[in-house]
Image (tube, grey):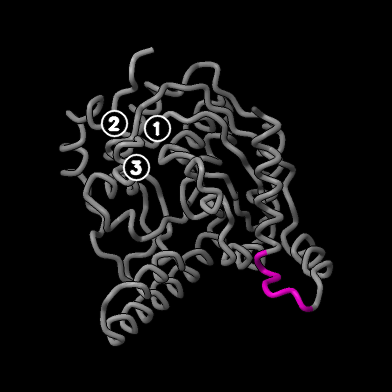
Amino acid sequence: MPMAKTLKELYGKYLAEFAQISHAAAKIDETEIYEEANPETRKYVSLITTDNVLPQSHIINIEYFKEFYDAVVNQGKSGVVMMDHYSNMDLPCFLHLLENYGEDWALDFSKRIVAIAGMKLNEANPIIRALTESFTRVVIYPTRSLNSVENQDISEEEKEAERQRARKINFAAMRAMDGCKKRGQIILVFPSGTRYRPGKPETKRGLREIDSYLRLFDLLLPVSINGNVLRFNPEAPENMIMDLVTPDVVTLTAGKMIECKPFRNKILESVPADHPDPKQVTVDTVMDIIEKLHNEAK
């Protein structure tokens, strides 16, 4: 079996153009939080999905997508999609399958998606920034990123400045999400906050701050993704343009939509009073639901 080629090898001729037509902010502050998709960079990402998402790819439980869509669009509910995360192409594949489902409502669903993106996707390098800006998103300062700053050998003043920056960015992000809700947009978030790395189960654990989404939204649609057209390269696991391109059958599987507040309250009522972290329990429950969907679709 031939060795898979890297993103750089297969699409390198496009990557320089891709970065040149990028106009997203290279450094994030509280004024650069909500960013509309760049249709010019999106064309390049669509090329990759069209080449590598195989024709047998499909959506399981499409009726759950439709029920969720109707509740947001026709009943004025606020909605969040939570999905497992295996690849930097998970969001493009999600949108590709909805766009190509062949019904107007599914196409409109795809256009309403606003992804939650960690700021390092803007700040890492120009090519990753161009990939990221292909999709409408709200940028946040993840706790994981702030924790890494705390562990750096820098002065307390520098650490405090970064804490302040994180607070400002995340406060602005909450306001931006509120605006999305009012416009009938649908937030999509990866609860693990990072791609799952085989052999590292901690990368599949949901972040405790995801609990706040259960407080902020009316409805949750849990979705799992199977199939992966862009895989970690063991020789360069942190360099996305060295990821391995692997044409694959991709399936999305939706669970039945969940009413967030009753769901959250029921979990919290079952948590012992002396539990050290009830919020983590709610997030773990969501992750268990998504994992079950993933395993059933295998």
Q: Nearer the viewer, mark 1 or mark 3?
A: 3
The disc labelled 2 sits on which kind of residue? Leu
Q: Mark 3 points at which residue?
A: 237
| Circle 3 residues within 10 Å: few <14, some 14–19, many ≥20 | few
Mark 2 residue element: helix
| Circle 2 residues within 10 Å: few <14, some 14–19, many ≥20 | some
Q: Which of 271 and 43 is in front in this view?
A: 271
For the residues labelled 2 and 1, the Cα–Cα distance comes to 8 Å
Q: Is residue 209 above or below residue 84?
A: below
Viewed as shown, does residue 221 lie left or right of 87? right
The magenta stretch is 274-280
| Badge number at residue 7 | 2
The disc labelled 3 sits on which kind of residue? Pro
Pinpoint residue 186: horizontal percent, then vertical percent: 56, 52
- Quarter of the image where the C terminus is located: top right
| Badge number at residue 221 | none
Query: Looking at the image, can residue 30 be seen?
Result: no
The stretch drawn in magenta includes residue 278: yes
The disc labelled 1 sits on which kind of residue? Leu
Q: Name the residue under label 1.
A: 230
Mark 3 residue element: loop
Pinpoint residue 254: horizontal percent, then vertical percent: 67, 38
For the residues labelled 2 and 3, the Cα–Cα distance comes to 13 Å
Badges 1 and 3: C-beta atoms under 8 Å apart?
Answer: no
